[in-house]
Amino acid sequence: MRTSRAIAIAALTLVAATGIAGCGNDTPTTEPTTDVTGSATTEPSGSSGPEVPADWQVASVEVAQLQVPANWNIRSSGDLSLSMRAPEDAIGISPGAAIFQGGVHAGEGDDEAAVDALAALEGKALADDVQNLKRLPNETINGSTFYHFQGDTGHEWEDHYGTVVPGGDHSVTVTWRFTKSDIDRKGAEALIAEIMPTYKAL
């Protein structure tokens, strides 16, 4: 009886020790990812924003970034401006592009009132050039409030987004233009809806 009891106690001790040793492997870890510059970054598993395919490119204007599919063409015009062009079709024609820009924000704050004030200025600037111009409801993307104007010209669909980055010192605009003869309005909206949710203030 004593021998059996000693064996049972030894077995329980071994099981407990094995369980404690295994606990060290339960610590959550983060997986490193690589941006287009090749530098490693670490994204925690609970980070905000949609899941983006691994081969998408990062388009950055110093104060903010968007991500676009691998087959889009990104051209920088400086630290605060770049273009993102949709891929060309079989005969070499792209349906359109976006201009992604950062700028100094002269107003106060970075809340919805600041975005509305920025939208009022943008609406006046667009009124003479864009037909059927309408302001859509503000959109919140990864914590940033955007104004959104939609309209068209004689040959292009246009969408204009703008926000104020945290701290209120900079604004960001994204201007989308698509050629009507190459893509319909729904197709243009589908491309925009794929990319705008990847916005992130830096």
Image (cartoon, helix red, strand yellow):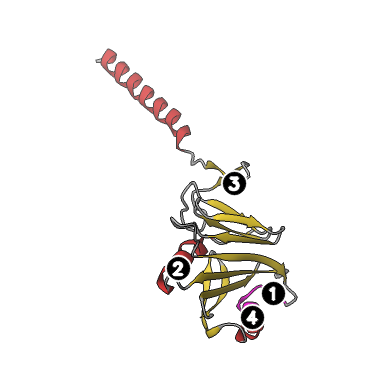
Q: Position of residue 50 (x, y in %)?
A: 47, 57
Q: Which of marks 4 and 1 is nearer the N terminus?
A: 1
Task: Let me know if residue 62 is in the magenta part.
Answer: no
Q: In which quarter of the image is residue 147?
A: bottom right
Label 2: how many residues lie within 10 Å, few (<14), some (14-19) or many (20+)? some
The mark found on residue 24 in the picture is none
* Residue appearing at x 32%, y 16% in the figure: 6
Name the residue that disc number 2 marks: 182
Between disc 2 and disc 4, the foreground one is 2
Name the residue that disc number 3 marks: 36
Q: Earlier in the sequence, mark 2 or mark 3?
A: 3
Q: Where is residue 138 in the image (x, y as percent from the top left)?
A: 53, 77
Between disc 4 and disc 1, the foreground one is 4
The mark found on residue 122 in the picture is 4
Q: Where is residue 111 in the image (x, y as percent from the top left)?
A: 63, 75
Q: Earlier in the sequence, mark 1 or mark 2?
A: 1
| Vertical placement of residue 7 versus 17, above or below | above
Q: Earlier in the sequence, mark 1 or mark 3?
A: 3
Q: Farthest residue in the front direction?
A: 91
Label 3: how many residues lie within 10 Å, few (<14), some (14-19) or many (20+)? few
Distance from Cα at disc 4 to Cα at disc 1: 17 Å
Residue 168 in view here = yes
Tag 1: amino acid: Gly
* Residue appearing at x 73%, y 77% in the figure: 107
Tag 2: amino acid: Asp
Span colored in magenta: 108-116
